[in-house]
């Protein structure tokens, strides 16, 4: 591949976080419980979210560090239950104050905030009452979004409605490593995605009606899907998995409805799993309006899956410890994600396949040409960092990010409008189902005393932000 090194002048070099994974302080200043609090505190749980990276108290230090290392954008998310402790009803002023202070500090340090409204942390009362299968949540979400737009919309210029709406049902209802810990329920997963897409569309339409000075979009995780062989049945397994994980919601966001081909694949999965999708005509009115107005796609990309036909029952084993080679993932009516011996993996069995990111970028430009702008809103490598005398040599992470950046720049050179890259993660954070030994940060967090240490990758990232090119 020809190498592409130079970034556009206005490119954002960001770092990403999420409220639940960094803030800690889950019982402070009136915050109400979210779905994850109970789950993390269940008997047998290996870790909890307190104090995570203690960002609730240390955000000034983290933003200073970001500034010093050339990071000029940060993804943060708002914890719904800091603003509305019960998910609805009375506003918690301390929550508003906290995010006001945080956003002001971001701006003061020249680290532009990119704010996500929902990053997995659904308020507990809603979670207990059907979660995103309950359509009542649509309007509660829009009410919460309105409060955020009203309070922070004068200063926040980049809003995302949801982070990875696919991960919520995939992990909570198919893989069983997110609450509510269910498995193999593809019909519920598909139904939930539809309901979240309606909530997304309504929030976009509301934001656009408020004439605020920013942009609004959504963050999707795009998983590369590759057929393991040329056999038609493997190619079909690839298409089914791609329809469920990627295409279904991309269609809703950018086509304003589901394409016939997408629906044929989704219906095949539903039929083989005794399910049915319920939609209403007004959902599509909202979709259409939002698709015309959405400003950007936030694209998270970590990995690709290699697909093979699978005729049997569903089987999943989640590698949540970093013991390489232990994952199993096969879904009835979809296909099996298998190991491709030619592709390296992380210790958590995630194939390292940077060309998959390029393929997804090109796919967006080809199939969703009204996308306007793409931000790479997450990309990074989970790694068991060694901390030796205050130093962390995370060369494999630098190599991983370099390979992905080269493919981003190749796509940019070919006309794809990518305006920023937010490394996952800014500092080490709590990994939802893996805990604290799967680290991603530019800044190492010593969880004994919450001290931060820049890793080798942080120095490398800084150099890159100064030169505006990929440095070896
Ligand atoms: C994305 C999420 O799915 O991937 C992040 O948006 C998450 O919140 C990240 O932490 C990495 O996943 P994991 O499971 O390795 O922590």
Image (cartoon, helix red, strand yellow):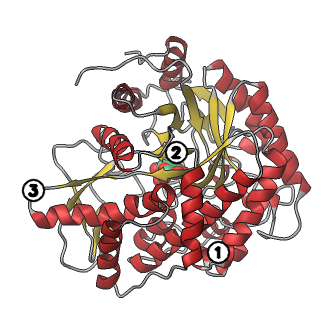
Instruction: Find numbered disc 2 in the image and state the secondary structure of the residue it sits on.
Output: strand
Instruction: Determine the residue positioned at 30% across, 42% down.
Output: 359
Q: Which mark is drawn over residue 230?
A: 3
Q: In which quarter of the image is the C terminus?
A: top left
Q: Which of 341 and 51 is in front in this view?
A: 341
- Whole-angstrom CA distance, mark 2 to mark 3, is 31 Å
Instruction: Determine the residue positioned at 66% across, 81% down.
Output: 129
Residue beneath disc 2: 298
Q: Which of 15 and 260 is in front in this view?
A: 260
**Which is closer to the viewer, label 3 or label 1?**
3
Image location (x, y in percent) of residue 469: 44, 16
For residue 97, say whether it is visible.
Answer: yes
Q: Earlier in the sequence, mark 2 or mark 3?
A: 3
Q: Which mark is drawn over residue 39?
A: none
For disc 2, does the CB lie below 8 Å from ligand 1?
no
Instruction: Find numbered disc 1 in the image and state the secondary structure of the residue it sits on.
Output: helix
Question: Crowding near pointer 1: few (<14 within 10 Å), some, many (20+)?
Answer: some
Q: Earlier in the sequence, mark 3 or mark 1?
A: 1
């Amino acid at each position: 591949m020809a190498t592409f090194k130079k970034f556009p002048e206005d490119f954002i070099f960001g770092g990403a976080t999420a409220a639940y994974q960094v803030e800690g302080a889950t019982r402070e200043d009136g915050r109400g419980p979210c779905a994850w609090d109970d789950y993390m505190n269940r008997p047998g749980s290996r870790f909890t979210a307190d104090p995570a990276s203690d960002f609730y108290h240390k955000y000034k230090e983290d933003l200073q560090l970001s500034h010093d290392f050339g990071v000029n954008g940060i993804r943060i998310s708002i914890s719904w239950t800091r603003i509305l402790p019960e998910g609805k009803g009375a506003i918690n002023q301390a929550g508003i104050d906290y995010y006001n202070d945080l956003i002001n500090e971001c701006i003061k340090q020249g680290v532009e905030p990119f704010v996500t409204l929902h990053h997995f942390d659904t308020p507990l009362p809603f979670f207990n009452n059907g979660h995103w299968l309950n359509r009542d949540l649509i309007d509660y979400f829009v009410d919460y979004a309105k409060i955020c737009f009203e309070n922070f919309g004068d200063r926040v210029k980049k809003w995302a409605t949801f982070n990875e709406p696919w991960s919520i049902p995939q992990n909570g209802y198919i893989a069983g490593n997110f609450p509510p810990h269910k498995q193999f329920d593809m019909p519920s997963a598909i139904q939930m995605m539809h309901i979240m897409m309606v909530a997304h569309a309504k929030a976009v339409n509301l934001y656009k009606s408020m004439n605020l000075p920013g942009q609004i979009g959504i963050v999707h995780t795009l998983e590369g899907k590759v057929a393991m062989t040329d056999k038609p049945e493997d190619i079909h397994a690839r298409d089914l998995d791609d329809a469920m994980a990627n295409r279904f919601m991309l269609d809703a966001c950018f086509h304003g409805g589901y394409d016939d081909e997408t629906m044929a694949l989704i219906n095949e999965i539903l039929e083989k799993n005794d399910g049915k999708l319920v939609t209403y005509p007004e959902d599509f009115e909202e979709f259409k309006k939002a698709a015309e107005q959405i400003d950007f796609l936030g694209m998270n990309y970590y990995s690709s899956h290699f697909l093979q036909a699978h005729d049997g029952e569903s089987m999943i084993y989640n590698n949540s410890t970093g013991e390489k080679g232990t994952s199993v993932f096969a879904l009835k009516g979809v296909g099996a994600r298998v190991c491709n011996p030619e592709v390296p993996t992380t210790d958590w069995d995630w194939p390292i396949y940077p060309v998959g990111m390029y393929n997804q970028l090109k796919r967006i430009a080809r199939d969703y040409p009204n996308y306007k702008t793409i931000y790479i809103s997450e990309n990074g490598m989970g790694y068991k960092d060694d901390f030796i005398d205050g130093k962390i040599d995370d060369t494999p992470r630098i190599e991983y990010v370099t390979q992905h950046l080269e493919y981003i720049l190749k796509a940019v050179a070919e006309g794809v409008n990518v305006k920023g890259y937010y490394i996952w993660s800014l500092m080490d954070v709590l990994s939802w189902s893996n805990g604290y030994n799967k680290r991603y940060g530019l800044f190492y967090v010593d969880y004994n005393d919450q001290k931060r240490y820049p890793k080798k990758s942080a120095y490398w990232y800084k150099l890159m932000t100064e030169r505006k090119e990929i440095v070896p």
